[in-house]
Image (cartoon, rainbow, N blue to C red):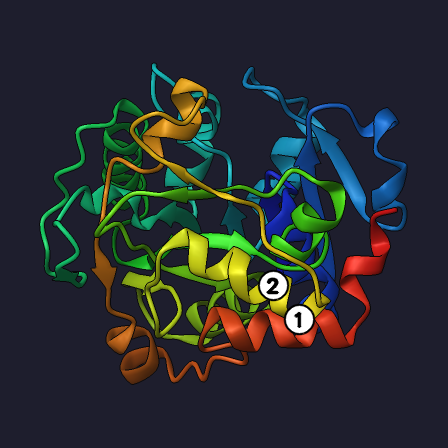
């Protein structure tokens, strides 16, 4: 199989690291290949929203599997806007990385893939529109993976504690799911192997308040957690505050049942334990 990735971000790069040898050829896009020394060894193509060059279009046309992780903008999905004709012309497997943020606020109640999206956030509504646009383009060949809050090497509570940027924001009743980047990689591979398309939540087994994650990471490190801050009075950017606007417990039962995914890190404790064993907190001085 030949793989092309639209948007070589954190999750996509981890997928290549774990499963790249399953493909005969791997290529992908970044905004500026000349600035990406960290991706040496991969075939990189420039893409920043406009029509890419002919070599990029040819690679996309030849791919058997397309993984797309580029977020939509106010005018829609940039990849579809630039490449809709190419994407509609071929019958290939497409995996689109979306977000569980599309479900919006359910006051801590459980939701699954049958729950209609209802987010009031513009970025979540744009995700819903992008999901539909990909399904309209690719039909039954597109797998929509709705990801929970992503963490993993370099991006986790151990690192933020060590760097002094961790905060314990308390908003009573607020919970949400997370997902380790290695489990995202497994879900992507399972979606590629699955015949046909569908929509699956990619999240852990235990939605929890954000302060619990920071407290547990501090216990692993043998340090005191930061003081609690009330959400109502905490100084936060509008973007940061918006992440607390929704509270829901998201089910991953369909992911396990239909795609056969077994999570390596079913809770944030499993994930942080593994990162701690790997010396993650020592990566930040």
Image point 45% across, 20% down: which residue? 237
Residue density around tag 2, few if under 14, some if 14–19, many if 20 or more, within 10 Å: many
Residue 171 versus residue 83 in the image, above or below: below
The residue lying toward the viewer, choosing from 189 and 185, is 185
In the rendered image, the vertical position of residue 209 relative to residue 82, given as above or below: below
Q: Horizontal and vertical percent for residue 110?
A: 15, 63
| Label 1 environment density (alpha carbons within 10 Å; few <14, some 14–19, many ≥20) | some
Q: Is residue 284 among the parts visible in the rendering?
A: yes
**Residue 93 in sight here:** no
Quadrant that contains the N terminus: bottom right
Q: Which label is found at residue 57?
A: none
Element type where label 1 sits in the image: helix
Classify residue 192 as left or right of residue 58. left
Q: Secondary structure at mark 2?
A: helix
Q: Are marks 1 and 2 in contact (CB under 8 Å)?
A: yes
Q: Whole-Å distance between the Cαs marked 1 and 2?
A: 5 Å
Instruction: Give the numbered dot on residue 220.
Output: 1
The spot of residue 113 in percent (x, y) is 18, 61
Number of marks drawn:
2
Quadrant housing residue 93: bottom left
Displayed quadrant of residue 53: top right
Write down the quadrant of residue 181 in the picture. bottom right
Q: Nearer the viewer, residue 209 or 194?
A: 209
**Residue pictured at 33% horizontal, 34% vertical:** 231
Residue at image point 25% right, 75% down: 254
User: Mark number for residue 217?
Assistant: 2
**Is 111 placed left or right of 230 in the picture?**
left
Residue at x 35%, y 74% (from the top left corner): 205
């Amino acid at each position: 199989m030949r793989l092309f990735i639209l948007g070589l971000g954190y999750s996509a790069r981890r997928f290549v690291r774990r499963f790249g040898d399953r493909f005969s050829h791997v290529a992908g896009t970044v905004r500026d290949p000349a600035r990406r020394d960290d991706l040496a060894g991969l075939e990189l193509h420039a893409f920043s929203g406009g029509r890419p060059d002919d070599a990029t279009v040819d690679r996309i046309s030849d791919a058997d599997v397309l993984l797309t992780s580029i977020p939509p903008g106010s005018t829609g999905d940039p990849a579809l806007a630039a490449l809709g004709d190419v994407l509609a012309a071929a019958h290939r497997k497409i995996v689109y990385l979306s977000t569980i943020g599309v479900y919006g606020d359910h006051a801590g109640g459980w939701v699954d893939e049958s729950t209609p999206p209802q987010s009031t956030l513009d970025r979540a509504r744009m995700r819903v529109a992008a999901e539909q646009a990909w399904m309209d383009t690719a039909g039954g060949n597109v797998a929509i993976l709705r990801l929970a809050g992503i963490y993993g090497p370099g991006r986790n509570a151990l690192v933020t504690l060590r760097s002094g940027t961790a905060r314990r924001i308390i908003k009573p009743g607020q919970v949400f799911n997370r997902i380790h980047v290695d489990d995202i990689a497994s879900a992507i591979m399972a979606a590629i192997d699955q015949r046909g398309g569908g929509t699956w939540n990619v999240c852990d087994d235990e939605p929890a308040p954000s302060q619990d994650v920071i407290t547990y990471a501090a216990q692993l490190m043998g340090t005191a957690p930061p003081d609690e801050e009330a959400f109502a009075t905490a100084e936060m950017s509008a973007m940061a505050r918006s992440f607390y606007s929704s509270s829901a417990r998201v089910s991953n039962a369909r992911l396990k049942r239909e795609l056969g995914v077994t999570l390596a890190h079913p809770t944030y404790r499993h994930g942080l334990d593994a990162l701690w064993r790997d010396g993650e907190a020592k990566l930040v001085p």
